[in-house]
Amino acid sequence: MAKRKDQQQEVVPSKNAPIKTFLIEDVSASVFSRENSVKGEMRTFYSVSFSRSYRDSAGKRKYVKTFNLEDLGKIVSLAQQADEYIRGLLNSQQAA
């Protein structure tokens, strides 16, 4: 069984870049934010994208959004981490 590596990566926000990425081995969860006007008031909405990386026969890194049975536990853990992160952001926004 492969060693489990849990990593977090802070990213400087840009228009299409994730605000945070969580990584377990070759599976990642990227958190994105977007601002939308709702009834004239700006609101922040969050979404999460999951991906798995691998190297092709030429050694080039590729990314896919399909997962093997062995990846499902990683997805669950990453989803929990992303959930806690987003809820923390929402709680800090409400407190402000």
Image: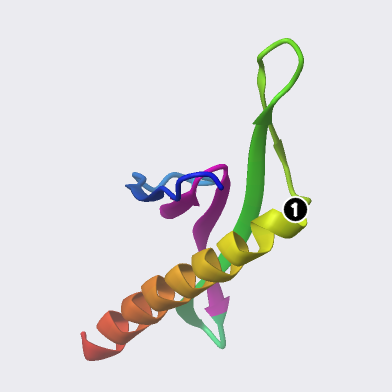
User: In the image, residue 59 lies at what x, y percent?
Assistant: 66, 14
Give the magenta-colored segment's residue range: 18-37
**The C terminus: image quadrant:** bottom left
In the image, residue 43 above or below residue 71: below
Along the line of sight, which residue is nearer the eye, 87 or 37? 87
**Label 1: few (<14), some or many (≥20) within 10 Å?**
some
Question: Which residue is drawn at the image coordinates 47% and 50% (left, top)?
Answer: 23
Q: Is the magenta stretch mostly helix, strand or loop?
A: strand
Callout 1 amino acid: Phe
Taking the view exactly as shown, the residue that stands out farthest to the front is 1
Under circle 1, the secondary element is: loop
- Left or right of 16? Residue 90 is left
Along the line of sight, which residue is nearer the eye, 63 or 73? 73
Question: Which residue is drawn at the image coordinates 56% and 88% (left, top)?
Answer: 39
- Left or right of 70? Residue 41 is left
Query: Which residue is labeled 1 in the image?
Result: 67
